[in-house]
Amino acid sequence: MAEKKNYYEVLGVAKNATEEEIKSAYRKLAKQYHPDLHPGDAAAAEKFKEINEANETLSDKQKRAAYDYELEHPGMGGMGGMGGFEGAGFSGFGDIFESIFQGFGGGTAHRDDTGDDIQIEMKLSFMDAVKGCVKDLTYMRNEPCAACKGTGAKGGTAQKPCSKCGGRGQVRFAQDTLFGRTVRVGPCPDCGGTGNIILEKCPDCKGKGYVRRETTVSLNIPAGVDTNSYIRKRGFGQAGKNGAAAGDLLVVFRVEPHKLFKRDKNDLYLDLPIPFSVAALGGTVKVPDVDDTFEYNIPEGTQSGTTFTVRGKGLKTRTGTGNLYLKVFVEVPTRLSKEQKKKLEEATSFDIRQYDKAKKFADNVSALYGKDPY
């Protein structure tokens, strides 16, 4: 039989962790490995599944008790370890689980009634993303009903304990099988697991505990966000059930491309066309950055495709300041007047074979064909 996963290790909590510690660890890991933030990443998807599996077990008192019993008594969860229990007062598989749940009969069923998270995609211009900005986001959500404080009962008090479950929110279902009596603990069908029966519904929300409304939230977007970066606004998700806390709002950014710049983390890349004369003779050109333009000196003899590094002219974010990389392209004129052509011929009337690459090329052509290419 495969070794049982240690759910405490999966969530990174101690075995005696409280419900709040488990919930906090789960939320942190679920945010980190959510598939929407790791599209196409099979490992992240598997980790997310494992995290949910661990939370589902450890956040439920009964499931956690059964799981702890299995950890402490490995091999007793199946038929292979049952024989020795007949003489110890157990009559079958079901009685073991009944004994485990015995101490929880008077407790309240654990329910995670926290509202669902809402995820919204927001498009940002390149400059808004790299410089930071403030944006208002308007969306629809289920807001907790203020009149009944999310309970669904008029005034928040027009309810009574459920008679079927005694206000515990859970009932036990027993069934006799070939292996003995099995006992299952589940939500009470009369009260839906809340432990209360509403006597009079809230007139504002019609007993739902929430109202559907348009919500506007202000987002302070820091400099340097990129595609798939996100902001979490706690409590701005869907309303919780039975007065529980609302979920969170997760805003995921999609940054639009820029006409000039390309970006890699904090670094910027720019293709810079320069005149033939500047490439040959050197000169100063104006170069744009995210704030304005600045002058940059191009050395004489610059070849097309050369990349220059301008330090500190990239993005300024909380993680540091990047560089600007200029890749120059020599623009060769295509439409010249006769006078311009004559001047250009006079200005460039030198033997190209004095340069290393041209000399090597001419020597190879001469060797192969006996002809000078120039």
Image (cartoon, helix red, strand yellow):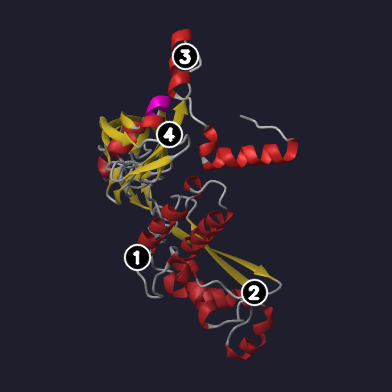
Count of numbered circles on the image: 4
**Badge number at residue 21:** 1
| Residue carrying label 4 | 328
- In this rendering, the label closer to the viewer, 3 or 1: 3
Are there few (<14), some (14-19), or many (20+) residues within 10 Å of tag 4? Answer: many
Task: Give the number of the disc on residue 2.
Answer: 2
Between discs 4 and 1, the one toward the N terminus: 1
What's the magenta bit mostly, secondary-structure-wise? helix
Q: Amino acid at mark 3?
A: Lys
Residue 81 lies, in percent from the top left, at: 65, 84
Q: Are marks 3 and 4 in contact (CB under 8 Å)?
A: no
Secondary structure of the residue carrying tag 2 is: loop
Res. 14 visible in picture: yes
Above or below 105: residue 346: above
Packing grade of label 1 (10 A; few <14, some 14-19, many >=20) is some
- Nearer to the camera, 287 or 107: 287
Q: CA distance from mark 2 to mark 4?
A: 61 Å
Q: Amino acid at mark 2?
A: Ala
Q: Secondary structure at mark 1?
A: helix
Please say if 331 is above or below 342.
below
Residue 333 horizontal/vertical position (percent): 47, 19
Q: Quadrant of the C terminus?
A: top right
Q: Label 1 to label 2, Cα distance in Å?
A: 28 Å
The residue identified by callout 3 is 342
Q: Which quadrant holds residue 106?
A: bottom left
